Amino acid sequence: MTKNERIAQRILKEGFRSVNGTLAQKVAAEFLRSLTASKEELTGGSRVQYLDRVFEMMEGTYKSIGIPVSNPNTLLQKYPVWWLYMNRGEPVAFAVFKSTPYGLKSGLSGHDGSSAGKSAAVQSIRTKFNIDGVFGEVSHKVKGIALASGAPKVPVEYVSDILGKSIEPTGDGFSYTRNISGVGRVEKMMVGKPRGVTTASKVSSDDTIDFHAHIACVAFE
């Protein structure tokens, strides 16, 4: 039984039997705190203290589809900007980025399997692509989260220059295919707000997402 489940049981069994409701209020507040994570941005040497923890979360998130980074030091070298989602002083989710002339390109994302971590990971997808200078490649249900949350689409004619890699447009003006090391040829769409690029208007769609079921959709390269 998880901590959150134990807390919920206390609310049901004890909280509402208390005369003045104080215990119920305290337990409910504890439950809400257990589901909340705050974002911290780390660069440079400040990342080192959390390196092992982030690598552990990355392995847990990607183990079923293939580990994209072979050792912790590669995370430091390849992704200079980290967003850590903290709950009670410990990271429960992460998103890491490459620095480019167009801003921050979203890379790997993951969580620790907790309710707070899963919630933070999904919320990260919902919000980061609406920030100026943040963009990334998405597909499948990750694309669904981003678009349903109002992320602008980047027209395909800009994508090759932004990536510095060749792509094959699919014909809809936004989607394309390209080869990703260790994965093969995949269909992607770029979303977000890369600097100096005119993006398309926001699009809405049904937002029903399970983060772990489609983490493979996040671009590794």
Image (tube, rainbow, N blue to C red):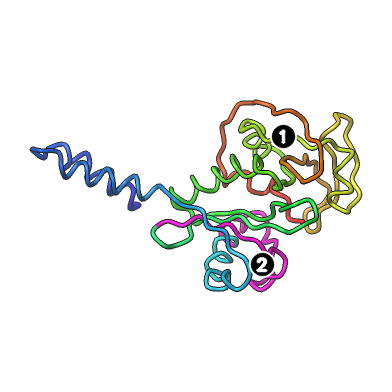
Q: Nearer the viewer, residue 192 or 23?
A: 192
The residue located at (69%, 54%) in the rendering is 107
**Snapshot quadrant of residue 80:** bottom right
**Structural distance between the alpha carbons of marks 1 and 2:** 28 Å
Looking at the image, residue 185 sits to the left or right of residue 132; the answer is right
Q: Which mark is residue 152?
A: 1
Q: Is residue 169 above or below residue 218?
A: above
Q: Which residues are magenta?
A: 59-87
Outermost residue toward the left? 19
The residue located at (44%, 62%) in the rendering is 90
- Determine which residue is flagged by label 2: 75
Q: Nearer the viewer, residue 137 or 56?
A: 137
The crowd level at tag 1 (other Cα within 10 Å; few <14, some 14-19, many 20+) is many
Q: Earlier in the sequence, mark 1 or mark 2?
A: 2
Looking at the image, residue 38 sits to the left or right of residue 109; the answer is left
Q: Position of residue 133 (x, y in %)?
A: 71, 47
**Snapshot quadrant of residue 17:** top left
Q: Is residue 66 magenta?
A: yes
Q: Is residue 196 above or below residue 60?
A: above
Residue flagged by tag 1: what amino acid is it? Pro
Q: Position of residue 42 (x, y in %)?
A: 58, 63
